[in-house]
Image (cartoon, rainbow, N blue to C red):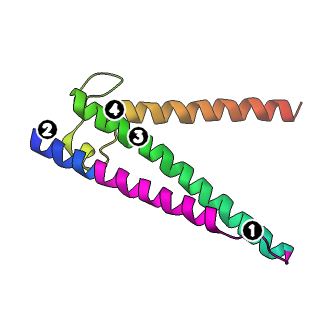
Amino acid sequence: MKQEKIQVIRQALVKKMEELWSSADRTISKMKTADGNYADPFDQAAIESNKYVELACRDRERELILDIKETIMRIDRGLFGICDHCGRVIHEKRLLIEPMSRLCMACQEQREIDKKQKKRRLAVREMSYNYV
């Protein structure tokens, strides 16, 4: 992949990371200023449930920020676009669609096959224990 395209991807990742950080800051400030005293216990439960969902979403965004940081470091170190497993070049189309890809298509497909097989083996084991 050409260096210009890589830098465009890097800039897009930096912009996305900044958006995620500002979203997290807004959530923190909103939760700090929210009043937690409600007379109705159902209102209190609804607010707490909303907070839980909001925090779960922010946790997923935190993981995304970590992935973005790692991808930016890979770009800076010249490792962007190289498969972590086999060392082959990751196809440019894949990187343009999902810049945080760390595996080539062949290795990603093999990983997904392995996960499915492992899940099936665990399911069979659990079933045999449950019905003994």
The residue drawn where x is 30% and y is 28% is 83
* 126 in the magenta segment: no
Which structural element holds mark 1?
loop
Taking depth in this image into account, of 31 and 94 the one nearest to the observer is 31
State which tag comes first along the sequence, 1 or 2.
2
The residue drawn where x is 26% and y is 29% is 82
User: In the rendering, at what x and y percent does residue 38 appear?
Assistant: 80, 75
Which structural element holds mark 3?
helix
The residues colored magenta run 14-40
User: In the rendering, at what x and y percent does residue 102 appear?
Assistant: 34, 34
Q: How far apart are marks 1 and 4 (CA)?
A: 51 Å
Q: How far apart are marks 1 and 3 (CA)?
A: 34 Å
State which tag comes first along the sequence, 3 or 4.
3
Q: Distance between the residues labelled 1 and 2?
A: 52 Å
**Residue 36's disc number:** 1
Secondary structure mostly taken by the magenta-highlighted segment of the chain:
helix
Q: How far apart are marks 3 and 4 (CA)?
A: 21 Å
The residue drawn where x is 36% and y is 23% is 85
State which tag comes first along the sequence, 1 or 3.
1
State which tag comes first along the sequence, 1 or 4.
1
